[in-house]
Every structure is written in C-alpha cells, then in structure tokens.
Image: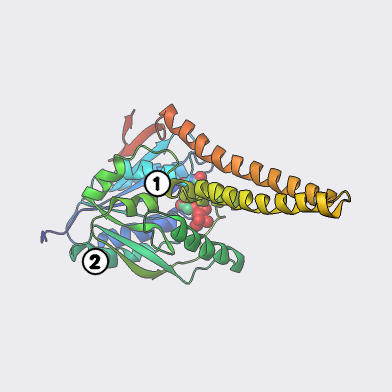
Amino acid sequence: MNSTPPRVSLAIPVYNEEAVVPELLRRTTAVLDGLPGGPHEIVLANDGSSDKTLEMLEEAARKDDRLVVVDLSRNFGHQIALTAALDHVSGDVAVLMDGDLQDPPEAVPKLLDAYKQGYDVVYVRRMNRKESWWLRACYYLFYRLLAVLSSTQLPLDSGDFGLMSRRVIEEMRRMPEHHRYLRGLRTWVGFRQVGIPIERSARAGGEPKYSPVKLLMLAFDGIFAFSIVPLRAAAILGVLAIALSILYSLYALYAKFWLGSPQGFTAVILVMTFLSGMNLFFMGIIGEYVGRVYEETKGRPHYVVSRVIKQNNAVQHL
Ligand code: UDP
Ligand code: MG
C-alpha cells in the first residue's frame, strides 16, 4: 500500500438541518484536524433546504477552505443528495455520512485503518440503533428480506455510512440509474470490502427527514433494484394456482355428475376474489418494474446544481 496518508473527503447530504449544522461542522472539522496528510475536505450537498442551513454552510465555507457546498436546485431526496456530494469529492477516499450526526465522524480514523489494510470499501455495520422498537424491527426484517431476495450479496444492517476508495468512487459515478440504493450499488462494485461494527447514535437535533413512507420507498428501491424474485413469484404462484384449479375442476365435475345438486357458489366467489386479488397484486408488481424502466429511459440527470460554493467566497455558478 501507498504510505502517504490519503486525502479524505467527507460527503454529507443536508436537508433542513439548521439545528445540527454548527455541531456537525465542529465535529467533522475536528476529525479532519486530527488526520495526517491532507488537504482534506467536507463536501456538503444542500438538498433544497428551506431553513437557514444554506446560509450557515455558506458562511462556514467562507471561513474554512476545506468546505465545499453543493447547493441543489430543489429537494431531490437523500440518496440523490448523497450522489451529488459524491460526484463533487476530490479526495483519495470518500466517507459517506448523514448530516444529523447519527453516523459519528469520530469513526473516520477507524475506517481509514481498514482502508490502509487494503480494503476498497469499509462499510459500517450498525449496532444498537437508537430508533423506536418498531422502526428497528422494520430495519431488521427489511435487511434480511432483501438479503434473501437479492442476487447481490448485500451485507446486513449496513447503511450508506462508510468509506470508499477512489476507484470505487469512479465506478459509482459511472452508474446511470435513477432509483439509487447506494449501499447496494457500492456492494455491487466489488473489490475488497469489509464491515466494521459501530454504534449508531441518536440524531443530534432536529427532526428526522425520512418519513415512514420515504423509508418504505427506499426499501422498495432496494428490493426492485436488486431482485427480480417478485416477478418470478408471480409465475410460481401462477403455476400453483393452475395446479389447484385442475384439482378443483376434477372435483367440480365429479360433484356435478355424481352428486347432482348445484354446488360450489361460495367456492366460486372465493376463488374469483382471491385470484383477481392476486392478479391485481402482481400487475402492480410488474407495474413497479415497468415504471422503473420508464424512469430510466427518460435519461434525465440525477440532480440539478444551483451553485457550488467553495474557497473563500469564490462562488462557482454552473
Ligand atoms: N436528507 C436529505 N434529503 C432528504 C432527506 C434527508 O439530504 O430529502 C439528509 C438529512 O439532512 C440527513 C440525512 O439525509 O443528513 C439522513 O436523513 P434522516 O436523518 O432524516 O434519515 P434517517 O436517519 O431517519 O434514516
Ligand atoms: Mg438520521
């Protein structure tokens, strides 16, 4: 391995985080101060915040030339904001982390230790989440369900928090997909990857920006982007339904000719409602995939940058 210390870029998305920004900047810059080598940088993607987040970042960037603020034209969502930050990093390694300090920046030296041992990706396994029990249960089940469904071996309980080497950054940038499940894409890239356990803190302040619905959407992105098992399930259940219907038809014929009496009104209703429900359900599943194909064919850029703010007030208009 190269013995010069790598230049580190932190990539952080922020959306209405005015309650956390001062603490975030204080802790991340303190971590960078403690790292050998440099120059290091902090790339913050402002995801269309409507509070004072941008002003605060802008002011900080004027005083500290390690800060780069990528101001997006509107709210694009966490994964896209993270993508925007990653697209603007210039270091030898990038560390992706949330802006609410749930991912402790003090873990960066630990990630770098693993990188120095020759790993291209060092992801963080989340121990002891601080969320409510039902959310923790959902996370737990989701990661396990996805691991079963996915064709890529996705690590359990690992979020986006983690380090990636320059060549992984380059590969991530080549990925055109719009529904981005970054932690999955990162695994897909390959090379040497390792997970290290780190405790996930509670939010340092403010409210979570992910609503339960948005979380569910992210979960769907994970499943639909990394598995076609739901499509296969339609075929498998279809075959089962055909087999059952043959059996039942035989019984119905027997009942008609040997038992004589009109039979099976209830059964007809049951079978009809059940099968039409299944039909609609799987049409919806197929629709999800088709919709995603449609989204991709439009080929729109992932995000729009309003401006990049860096280095002593030098504002770069795009
Ligand atoms: N975030 C963002 N855009 C959004 C939602 C969230 O950039 O539309 C940022 C947010 O500011 C935070 C990170 O993404 O830095 C994670 O968001 P949050 O803490 O709400 O997610 P959770 O920890 O609940 O999964
Ligand atoms: Mg959070």
Q: Is mark 1 within 8 Å of ligand 1?
A: yes
Q: Secondary structure at mark 1?
A: helix
Q: Amino acid at mark 2?
A: Ala
Q: Earlier in the sequence, mark 1 or mark 2?
A: 1
Q: Residue at x 43, y 54 (%)?
A: 99
Q: Position of residue 15 (x, y in %)?
A: 49, 46
Q: Position of residue 316 (x, y in %)?
A: 31, 31
Give the residue drawn at x 71%, y 52%. Answer: 250
- Of the pair 4 and 191, the residue shown nearer to us: 191
Q: Is residue 17 visible?
A: no
- Image point 21% across, 48% down: which residue? 167
Percent across and percent down for residue 96 are 35, 53
Label ID, residue 82: 1
Q: How are the residues colored? A: rainbow
Where 151 falls versus 306 (above or below)? below
Residue named by callout 2: 114
As helix, strand or loop, the secondary structure at mark 2 comes to helix
Say left or right for 190 vs 76.
left
The residue positioned 37% from the left and 61% from the top of the image is 27
Question: Of all residues shown, which one is farthest toward the front?
Answer: 258
- The tag on residue 24 is none
* Residue 135 point in image, percent of width and height: 58, 63
- Give neighbour class at mark 1: few <14, some 14-19, many 20+ (Cα, 10 Å): many
Q: Nearer the viewer, residue 82 or 55?
A: 82
The quarter in which the C terminus is drawn is top left
Label 1, label 2: how many angstroms apart (C-alpha)?
22 Å
Identify the residue at the far right of this view.
Answer: 261
Three-letter amino acid code at the position of disc 1: Leu
Ligand 1 has an atom within 8 Å of the beta carbon of the residue at disc 2:
no
Q: Which residue is at the front of the view, 60 or 309? A: 309
Placement of 74 over or under 262, stated as above or below:
above
